[in-house]
Image: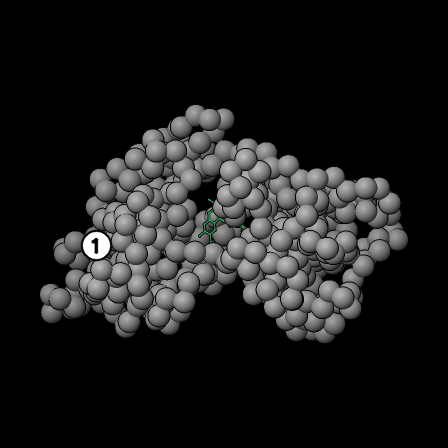
């Protein structure tokens, strides 16, 4: 059987490597992994690339290295259309046929139709976005150093982040530390402003109150203006528009307020739910389609107890990948598939260079120990890739 996996992010790459292990001595089955890039992007480190805290290459791992002697065939191509009933997909390099397909194309920024955001806000979803933002941040400080008009200088030094989830919170913490260094480097004595705007009543929705309070206090102590219940209404050149009718003059506006599934998921015409995510059966197959599996940010996962959607994360994508590898092996060997059960995982939100909040086994860890835990999880992941 020809098994095709679309997307080699956290989910697709883990799946391909695990499945290759299961199918090692079965030459009648092949695995083709397709991604638009030549390097695996470590998205969980993008806030550090964007702020300039780590070199861009530290968040990339070449597929050639990870997949060497793995038995997985890799093709660099852009997927342009899913044609599930014809059992094929269209890509920038031609038509690819499959017997079993796994869609792991990740997500994209959700703008909720807010005017001007797509044009005037920086997204932070890919390595390319992070590198662009990094250059812009440095440029803003250089321009502030040269600017003689106080209002224009302040606008260069105003950084607004919309969305106080994982990405927005981690970016705010990292920027607070990095801007101090950049201002010293370019001899800018005027203070920088970082505003973190969140529509709900607090940051880090879904985290326990003690973690939220700790994260908020840490950011505020380093000068971040945390603004809960402050929905963004739109953006214009050099301005962030608020639902209150006010406008903030800012040289930098980063939108981290939402994620939706890759657009090819909804364009396929198959069942989708919240955020254009594929609706799955309990075995992680696309509802009603035996030969299609979906995982990661493209998939809709609901908590069986609360009925609430589970926030997409790298850890969830990897758990789904391991389960799908097992199920694909069962499928090709003619055995019934097993339902997916999500296991609890440790979560850590970095708050800058030496602070974080982490939840591990029901315990809240904070400060440098939590930061160390987060660093260890990065290192463990890289090591697991042999990089
Ligand atoms: C800034 C940031 C910080 C985050 N921090 C954390 C964190 O600390 N912890 C955590 O658990 N999660 C975190 N996440 C979320 C986590 O990164 C995602 O949930 C995870 O990457 C989802 O994995 P995935 O395999 O579904 O998609 P991805 O990892 O996004 O992979 C999708 C892959 O598909 C490829 N692709 C997309 N379109 C095409 C196409 N048309 N053709 C071919 N290939 C294509 C992409 O190149 C990519 O390799 C963070 C996300 C961001 C953006």
User: What residue appears at the point 63 percent right and 71 percent down from the top-left corner?
Assistant: 80
Is residue 248 something that shows in the picture? no
Q: Residues within 10 Å of mark 1 (few under 14, many from 20)?
A: some
Q: Which residue is mark 1?
A: 193
Quadrant in which the N terminus is drawn: bottom right
Quadrant assignment for ligand 1: bottom right
> Is 79 on the left-hand or right-hand side of 307?
right
What x and y, as percent, mark residue 158?
A: 22, 59
> Is 284 on the left-hand or right-hand side of 28?
left
User: What residue appears at the point 66 percent right and 57 percent down from the top-left corner?
Assistant: 103
Query: Measured along the vertical axis of the image, is residue 386 above or below residue 98?
Result: above
User: What residue appears at the point 46 percent right and 61 percent down from the top-left corner?
Assistant: 109
As rendered, which of 215 and 381 lies closer to the eye?
215
As rendered, which of 97 and 138 lies closer to the eye?
97
As rendered, which of 347 and 306 lies closer to the eye?
306
What x and y, as percent, mark residue 78?
A: 63, 68
User: What residue appears at the point 16 percent right and 62 percent down from the top-left corner?
Assistant: 154
Query: Measured along the vertical axis of the image, is residue 374 above or below residue 83?
Result: above
What x and y, as percent, mark residue 223?
A: 21, 46
């Amino acid at each position: 059987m020809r098994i095709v996996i679309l997307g080699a992010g956290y989910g697709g790459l883990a799946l391909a490597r695990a499945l290759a292990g299961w199918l090692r001595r079965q030459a009648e089955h092949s695995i083709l992994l397709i991604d638009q890039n030549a390097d695996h992007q470590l998205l969980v480190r993008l806030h550090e690339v964007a702020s300039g805290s780590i070199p861009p290459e530290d968040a990339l791992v070449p597929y050639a290295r990870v997949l060497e002697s793995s038995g997985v065939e890799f093709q660099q191509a852009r997927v342009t259309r899913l044609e599930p009933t014809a059992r094929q997909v269209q890509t920038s390099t031609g038509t690819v046929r499959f017997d079993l397909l796994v869609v792991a194309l990740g997500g994209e920024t959700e703008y909720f139709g807010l005017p001007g955001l797509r044009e005037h806000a920086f997204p932070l979803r890919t390595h390319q976005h992070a590198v662009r933002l990094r250059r812009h941040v440095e440029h803003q400080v250089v321009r502030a150093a040269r600017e003689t008009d106080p209002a224009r200088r302040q606008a260069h030094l105003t950084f607004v982040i919309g969305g106080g989830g994982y990405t927005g919170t981690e970016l705010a913490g990292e920027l607070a530390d990095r801007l101090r260094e950049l201002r010293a480097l370019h001899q800018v004595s005027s203070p920088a402003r970082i505003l973190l705007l969140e529509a709900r009543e607090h940051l880090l929705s879904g985290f326990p109150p003690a973690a939220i309070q700790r994260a908020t206090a840490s950011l505020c102590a380093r000068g971040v203006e945390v603004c809960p219940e402050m929905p963004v209404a739109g953006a214009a050149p050099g301005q962030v528009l608020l639902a209150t009718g006010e406008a903030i003059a800012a040289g930098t506006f980063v939108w981290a307020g939402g994620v939706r599934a890759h657009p090819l998921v909804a364009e396929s015409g198959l069942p989708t739910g919240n955020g254009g995510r594929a609706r799955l059966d309990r075995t992680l197959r696309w509802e009603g389609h035996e030969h299609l599996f979906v995982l990661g940010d493209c998939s809709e996962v609901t908590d069986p107890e609360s009925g609430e959607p589970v926030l997409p994360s790298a850890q969830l994508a990897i758990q789904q990948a391991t389960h799908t590898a097992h199920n694909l092996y069962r499928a090709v060997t003619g055995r019934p598939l097993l339902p997916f059960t999500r296991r609890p995982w440790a979560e850590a939100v970095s708050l800058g260079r030496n602070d974080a909040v982490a939840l591990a086994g029901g315990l809240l860890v904070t400060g440098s120990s939590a930061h160390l835990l987060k660093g260890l999880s990065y290192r463990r992941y890289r090591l697991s890739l042999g990089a």
